Image (cartoon, rainbow, N blue to C red):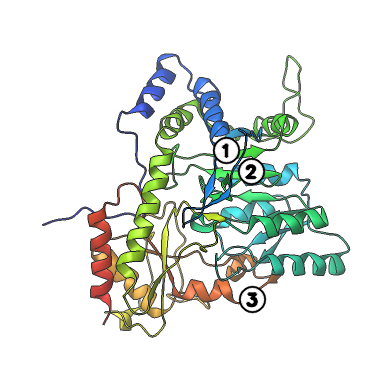
Amino acid sequence: MSRNRIYLCLAHMSEVGLEQKYIKEAFDTNWVVPLGPNVNGFEKDLEDFVNEIPHQVRNDGTTLIAASEPQSLAKRVVALSAGTAAVHLALIACGVKPGDEVCVQSFTFCASSHPITYLGATPVFIDSEKDTWNMDPELLEEAIKDRIVKTGKKPKAIVPVALYGMPYNVDKIMAIANKYDIPVVEDAAEGFGSRWKGRVLGTFGKYGVLSFNGNKMITTSGGGALVTANEDEWREIMMYATQYRESYPYYQHEKIGFNYRMSNICAGIGRGQMTIVNDHIAHHKHVQKMYEELLKDVKGVHVHAQPNTGEYDSNYWLCTITIDPKVKIKGQENAYKTIVTGAVGGAAGVIHAASSAVTDCQPNDNVEALRVFMDAAGIEARPVWKPMHKQPVYKNCPAYVNGVSEAIFKIGMCLPAGPYVSDDDVKYIVEKIKEAIV
């Protein structure tokens, strides 16, 4: 029986088609510009979502924290064209300028660090802790102290990342940030709906970054948002996102702004998606539990899971595994023998033709062999992100490393987890992993 290809995380619309309803309203009323009722409505939906502080319950059922009365964080949200735009505007609002430095997690996608370079600043890469794979607080403080000694000034911002939805250690990172009076830009692009002690990621720092790319927890086709702390910061970000136009009857610009607002069409998709966001989060967590159960007895394959301490509540945007180097995979002898000529899996965009099949930092042969095996079986699986401090474009940037992210990159793999991934699909994926092992 033929089987449809299983992708990591495909966009999934609401069953009642609310996305199309809001889009139709935009066309019917001719609101097809980067403002309008859908943009306003989507921002309001996002604000309601991020400002909620529910009870947090441990895995054993006991309450960790409980609000005695309903609370409101009063965060404001600006809907933007991309999560990358949100990082960019947040750094501008933090005062990042040419010659400055910004501490950023190394184990991440390039959108966390590229906007630092847009501003003429330098990324200072911070390696990961073993349990979460996210920014190591001890290394962060070591880096801050060392940069002050070497440059005479402290970094202008700190950018932790919720890798694959896993919360970073908010308490420790915020304590260090407050100690040195450095603003935090939370990159929760992969962590929409993930929580720390019951509170939504992106609401702890000075700014929070969200993403609604086609493969995220919810989608607006392309798009993102910036969470701000108060009304004044919201207004400033809004100005920067709309070319920073002054209040004259003609266009007058006293600061450089950007065309970063979200389309009213895309926001219509977002409004429909917000009605099913909790369903999506619940599904990803369900798939994670299935992988944990079905792979627990497979020797040499380990499912990465959140620390069982109560503070962490990951959305498990993607489920990840690690594969011991000694595990042998069918076809492993052919790994990295030929140059990849096109985008792998669901990767989008135009890629530059590689000159070699290998680099000085790549996944182990068995990981690549498993990727190829799964691809042939109709399953999209991908290596985890290559650490930014090992990217050629960042070879001259300061990096404070402990070997964790490089080690995980060599043995890590992402497995499908999106709303279209059924229980039967998960069982099939696990069967193929077992079949691939020699």
Q: Mark 2 belongs to which amino acid?
A: Thr
Residue assigned mark 3: 402
Instruction: Sort mark 2 into few (<14), some (14-19) or many (20+) by Cα contacts within 10 Å.
Output: many
Q: Mark 3 belongs to which amino acid?
A: Asn
Residue assigned mark 2: 203
Residue 9 visible somewhere in the drawing:
no
Give the side of residue 118 with respect to residue 319, left or right.
right
Give the side of residue 198 with respect to residue 292, left or right.
right
Instruction: Sort mark 3 into few (<14), some (14-19) or many (20+) by Cα contacts within 10 Å.
Output: some
- Which mark, by number, is residue 290? none
Residue 23, position as x, y percentages in the image: 40, 24
Instruction: Sort mark 1 into few (<14), some (14-19) or many (20+) by Cα contacts within 10 Å.
Output: many
Q: Nearer the viewer, mark 3 or mark 1?
A: 1
The quarter of the picture where residue 130 lies is bottom right
For residue 58, above or below residue 299? above
Q: Mark 1 belongs to which amino acid?
A: Val
- Sequence order check, earlier mark of 1 and 2: 1
